[in-house]
């Protein structure tokens, strides 16, 4: 998909007028194809506004992104929603080359920074914790004997 929807032409904003932003982005831009623990398949509805304030381009964005993320305890994938609510970005105008600013990378970073490193399928805990603990306890027992067995053989 072309990234043109995320382009802001700052020449059109010269009057200090606010321009509405609205686009539907293919989740491909999140670049998660090689991530086995996180995926997003639904198109992302982005809305917001942009305007110039002094020497800065201001971009305000809102969106809701539905991910599928792996639980850190039981390894099951579960739905995880990231919401951006009027998140504000400021970009110095002098850093914008060619008078076109692409907010795609900013948006991607802002969305992915909300993804927890230690995601739990039950929110604050793992729903399958009891089963996992049973399984881990069993594994541990087996592990205790394995290395010694190797040495004796
Ligand atoms: Zn879990």
Image (tube, rainbow, N blue to C red):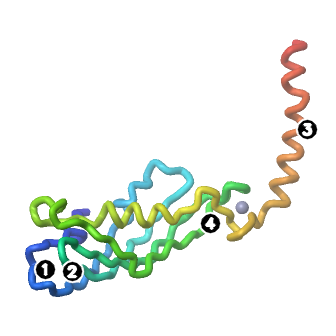
- Disc nearer the start of the sequence (1/3): 1
Q: Position of residue 35 (x, y in %)?
A: 49, 50
Q: Nearer the viewer, residue 36 or 98?
A: 98
- Disc nearer the start of the sequence (4/3): 4
Q: Would residue 50 appear left or right of 147 to someone viewing this image?
A: left
The answer to whether mark 2 and mark 1 are in CB contact below 8 A is yes
The 10 Å Cα crowd at callout 3, few under 14, some 14 to 19, many 20 or more, is few
The answer to whether mark 4 and mark 3 are in CB contact below 8 A is no
Q: Position of residue 67 (x, y in %)?
A: 51, 67
Quarter occupied by residue 84: bottom left
- Disc nearer the start of the sequence (4/2): 2
Q: Which residue is mark 2?
A: 51
Residue drawn 86% across and 15% down? 151
Residue drawn 55% across and 64% down? 68
- Disc nearer the start of the sequence (1/4): 1
Q: Is residue 67 above or below residue 133?
A: below
Q: Would residue 149 appear left or right of 115 to someone viewing this image?
A: right
- The answer for how far apart the CA atoms under marks 4 and 2 are is 38 Å
Instruction: Identify the disc placed on residue 78.
Output: 4
- Disc nearer the start of the sequence (3/2): 2
Residue drawn 39% across and 55% down? 31
Q: Nearer the viewer, residue 48 or 75?
A: 48
Q: Which residue is mark 3?
A: 141
Q: Nearer the viewer, residue 115 or 80?
A: 115
Instruction: Identify the disc placed on residue 36.
Output: none
- The answer for how far apart the CA atoms under marks 3 and 2 are is 62 Å
Q: Position of residue 127 (x, y in %)?
A: 76, 67
Residue drawn 33% across and 71% down? 89
Q: Nearer the viewer, mark 3 or mark 2?
A: 2
The secondary structure type at the circle numbered 2 is strand
């Amino acid at each position: 998909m072309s990234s043109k929807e995320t382009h802001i032409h700052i020449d059109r904003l010269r009057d200090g007028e606010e321009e509405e932003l609205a686009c539907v982005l293919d989740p491909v831009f999140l670049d998660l194809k090689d991530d086995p623990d996180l995926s997003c398949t639904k198109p992302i509805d982005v809305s917001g506004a942009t305007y110039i304030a002094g020497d800065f381009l201001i971009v305000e964005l809102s969106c809701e992104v539905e991910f599928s993320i792996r639980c850190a305890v039981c390894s099951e994938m579960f739905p995880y929603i990231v919401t951006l609510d009027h998140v504000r970005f400021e970009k110095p105008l002098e850093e914008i080359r060619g008078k076109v600013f692409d907010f795609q990378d900013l948006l991607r970073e802002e969305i992915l920074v909300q993804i927890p490193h230690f995601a739990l399928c039950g929110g604050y805990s793992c729903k399958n914790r009891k089963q996992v603990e049973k399984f881990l306890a069993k594994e541990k027992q087996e592990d205790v004997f394995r290395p010694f067995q190797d040495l004796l053989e």
